[in-house]
Image (cartoon, rainbow, N blue to C red):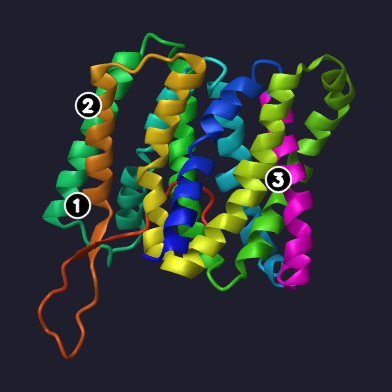
Amino acid sequence: MSRRGWILFGAMCVVWGIPYLLIKIAVREIGPAELVFLRTALGALLLLPIALARRELRASLRPWLSLIVYTVVEIGLPWLLLSDAERHVDSSFTGLVIAGVPLVAAVLARLTNRAERLTATRVTGLLVGFGGVAVLLGFHTGAGGVVPLIELGGVVVCYAIGPLIIERRLSSVPRYGVAAASLVVGAVMFAPVAVPNLPELARHVSPRPALAALALAVVCTALAFVLFFALIAEVGGVRATVITFVNPAVAVLLGALVLGEDVTPLTVVAFALILAGSVLATRRRTATSPTNPAAAPDQPAAAPGQPALEPTADR
């Protein structure tokens, strides 16, 4: 990988590793619906000019029904559930739970596509990964109650379904067009609930949550898409999505350093199991070429982590 590729890779690991910290700070004074609206609306304002300049917006609107479904599954519902859950659980814990998305994605891919084989390696990965999730949830069951755990489970399922929609319904739609259009749709969805509360929110919100919300929109949404697309162009879709396996570690580290959240040995063990399981469960064999009948070694499949906009990759 080139030097530019490594720089983009490192930037993405940080940019998509800090949302959990920023959400935790923002929801102390900003409601979940208002936070999602601010993130989508500001992100759309920044990405729309790029999509228009590249003439990609019109093409993204043609499959409008798939676009709406994608927005609900990948942005609207998971971001709302994530924001509400983080009012009760640590940001580091949230990041670790979301690390299980590739495991659920592997199961869903098999259930919805009979050609998707579950090899012994992938089954082992699923068992190891879900074992790590069980350890993590068992250790944190008493912290924050059951509702946040259910909400985070919903986020994991949504993030696992999103790539399937991209792959099967929106694979031919330009990336910036989908990104900008989905953020616009998301902002419209939350506007009726959030906009009436914005004047009151503006009078009472303190600088730290306000800056966290702004960073979520500018850095973790608009800038993140630009960097991610540049990374895909530099190193390819499969390599780009390896950031999925690094983001949770960034979330745990920032939660401990900035918010003083506990990182126990059991947390480290759970993360190691989830990471190892995700890597194994999302590996698949490349197609065999006519000139080389030997089976190619396993290659990591694209793994879910953030909004799915790469046609050849899950996330």
Could you give the CA–CA distance between mark 2 and mark 1, rounded to whole angstroms?
20 Å
- Residue, disc 2: 269
Report the predominant secondary structure element of the magenta stretch: helix
- Residue, disc 3: 186
Q: Residue at point 74% right, 63% down?
A: 50
Rendering coords of residue 15 (x, y %): 54, 43
Q: Is residue 154 magenta?
A: no
Rendering coords of residue 67 (x, y %): 64, 58
Amino acid carrying mark 1 in the image: Arg
Please identify the quarter of the rendering in which residue 292 is found: bottom left
If you read the primary sequence from the N terminus, does the residue marked by circle 3 or circle 2 appear first? 3
Q: Are marks 2 and 1 in contact (CB under 8 Å)?
A: no
Q: Residues within 10 Å of mark 1 (few under 14, many from 20)?
A: many
Determine the secondary structure under disc 1. Answer: helix
Q: Nearer the viewer, mark 3 or mark 2?
A: 2
Position of residue 166 in the picture relative to residue 282 (left or right): right
**What segment is highlighted magenta in the picture?**
32-57
Could you give the CA–CA distance between mark 3 and mark 1, rounded to whole angstroms?
35 Å
Q: Residue at point 59% right, 36% down?
A: 79
Q: Is residue 124 visible?
A: yes
Amino acid carrying mark 3 in the image: Gly
Quadrant occupied by the N terminus? bottom left
Q: Is residue 47 magenta?
A: yes
Amino acid carrying mark 2 in the image: Val
Determine the secondary structure under disc 2. Answer: helix
Rendering coords of residue 170 (x, y %): 56, 66
Determine the secondary structure under disc 3. Answer: helix
Q: Residue at point 26% right, 49% down?
A: 279
Position of residue 303 in the picture relative to residue 72 (left or right): left
Q: Residues within 10 Å of mark 3 (few under 14, many from 20)?
A: many
